[in-house]
Amino acid sequence: MSQWDGKSKGTVIGYKIFVFLIKKVGIKSAYFILYFVASYYFLFLKKSNASIFYYFHKRLGYSYFKSKKMVFKSYYTFGQTIIDKIAISAGMKDKFTYEHDGGEKIIKLLKEKKGGVLISAHIGNFEIAEHFFGEIDVDLQINLVTTDLEHSEIKNYLESIAQKPKIKFIIIGEDMSHVFEINAALARNELVCFTGDRYFEGVKSMSEELLGENANFPAGPFLIASRLKVPVVFVYVMKEPNLHYHLYTREAIVKHRDEKGLLKAYTESVESMVKKYPLQWFNYFDFWKQTHNQK
């Protein structure tokens, strides 16, 4: 199944080494160490290698050898976004530069105080979006719906070095309590932000074409967004060269109770972004349920 287990690779000691390098030597020194980490992943993580190779070779149409090279580059780029997230969370936001393409749309939603739905994806570095949103969300109106499945030791360590979050989080739980929190936030006319490209076993899904092949997506964000008479925007935070980030905000055209149409608009939006930033697709699992068919 094209589902994700919610956990990332890594150890606490590995994170501590990167934090030490970032603080004492600099962000780009930590990037250098990534060559060795990416090499390990490239050589030994056979399952995720097959999934990301399929993405480059079959979905983007790269040659066999270019796809192999891109697998390594993908791990390296993903590692950079993790280092950037740690650095920004630890108070080194001023080391980076930023631009917000379409940011006036979110500012308008916040000022109107009528609510809205933001939908993103696991491309780029959306985990640092809170640092963008925190600057414009002075009344804490943005709620980020997220999982809490990281290894507890890593999670606790990262929380111990991070600055206080500037937006609110709604944690997806097995008891479905997050559904009530989402409804409460929307009833307060706040903004709720989802990622729309990963689902878990037992959760209702929808199918749509992405990069020429059908894949499954969680139904929740699209059902909620299409049934509310509030604006819907797609948001992505993409890494650029030289410690620069580009936040994209794109307003969606939504017909009432047309979740399939909204999902189609979403996949088209994600596809255009992935084609612009092919190395920043970070779904390292069998997204299209096709890797077993690779030749």
Image (cartoon, rainbow, N blue to C red):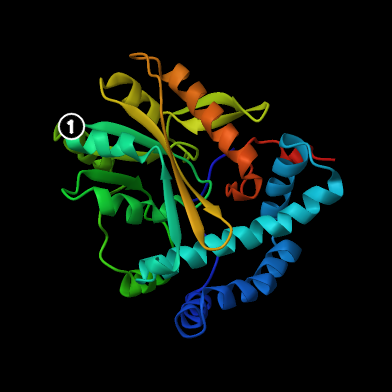
Horizontal side, residue 84 vs residue 212: left or right: left
Please provide percent x and percent y for residue 114.
Answer: 18, 29
Which sits in the foreground, 29 or 71? 29
Q: Classify mark 1: residues with Cα within 10 Å, few (<14), some (14-19) or many (20+).
A: few
- Give the residue displayed 50% in from the left and 63% down from the top: 82
Note whether 157 is above or below 289 in the view shown.
below
Q: Residue furthest toward the bottom?
A: 24
- Front one among 67 and 95: 95
Nearest the eye: 206 or 255: 255
Name which residue lies at 63% across and 76% down: 33
Q: Quadrant of the C terminus?
A: top right
| SS class, disc 1 | helix
Q: Position of residue 78 (x, y in %)?
A: 58, 58
Q: Which residue lies at the image location 48% right of the left edge and 78% below the top edge?
A: 22
Tell me residue 55's x, y (percent). 70, 41
Left or right: where does residue 260 sit relative to residue 138? right
| Amino acid type, label 1 | Glu
Q: Can residue 179 be seen here?
A: no
Q: Nearer the viewer, residue 51 or 74?
A: 74
Who's the residue at 56% across and 75% down the image?
30
Can residue 72 be seen here? The reply is: yes
* Image: 2 above or below 29: above
Total number of numbered discs in the rendering = 1
Residue 195 in picture, x, y percent from top left:
42, 40
Quadrant where the N terminus lies?
A: top right
Give the residue at mark 1: 112
